Each structure stands twice: as C-alpha cells, then as structure tokens.
Image: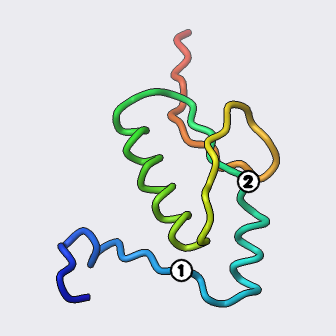
Amino acid sequence: MKGDDGYKLWLGYQKITVPDLARQYNQAISGILVKGQSATLKIAEQELRLALETMLDRKIPGLKASMNNAILMGTPKVQKK
C-alpha cells in the first residue's frame, strides 16, 4: 500500500471478491437510517457508508424511514422518571 496514509493502512476496505458472499451482504443491507444529528453520528455514518460502498461496490442509500434490512444508527434516548 505504497503512499497510503495511516488511515488507509488501518481501515483499508477492500471489495468483496467472493460472489456468493457479496450477494449475501447485498441482500442483507437495504440502506442506512440515522436517528439523530450529532457530529459523531454523521462521522460514523460517513465511515460506514465508505466501508460498505467500497466492499460491496454499490451505492448505499440513506433512508428516511425504517425498512427491511436497514442498518439503524443512533443513540438511546434516556427516559427520565
């Protein structure tokens, strides 16, 4: 990985080249739904999207509502008694 910075060396996402495995992952992931708007969640979503799109070689849509096989990102809401 000549010329890569530390980030790419640490998180070097690679395309899944085993067709059956790639198909299973593609069927299992319909998109990403983020509940919340914190800076941390935005960064986590960007990183997850980068990883999935690189590994699965397709765009991963952002979702406005939950659907089957969606990846849900968020933080638990603390309920006060």
Name the residue located 70 percent from the left edge and 71 percent from the top edge: 25
At which x and y percent is residue 3? 17, 82
Q: Helix, strand or loop at disc 2? A: loop
Label 1 CA crowd tier, 10 Å (few <14, some 14–19, many 20+):
some
Name the residue located 67 percent from the left edge and 38 percent from the top edge: 63
Label 2 CA crowd tier, 10 Å (few <14, some 14–19, many 20+):
some
| Image disc number at residue 30 | 2
Q: Are marks 1 and 2 in contact (CB under 8 Å)?
A: no
At which x and y percent is residue 55? 55, 73
Q: Which residue is mark 1?
A: 15
Q: Is residue 7 left or right of residue 74?
A: left
Q: How many marks?
A: 2
N-term mark: 1 or 2: 1
| Image disc number at residue 48 | none
Q: Is residue 3 above or below residue 39?
A: below
Quarter of the figure with the N terminus: bottom left
Q: Is residue 53 above or below residue 63?
A: below
The part of the image, by quadrant, that contains residue 23 is: bottom right
Q: Of the residues shown, which amino acid type is indicated by label 2?
A: Ser
The part of the image, by quadrant, that contains residue 4 is: bottom left
Q: Helix, strand or loop at disc 1? A: loop
Q: Is residue 77 above or below residue 23?
A: above
Q: Of the residues shown, which amino acid type is indicated by label 1?
A: Lys
At which x and y percent is residue 81? 56, 9
Foreground residue among 31 and 35: 31
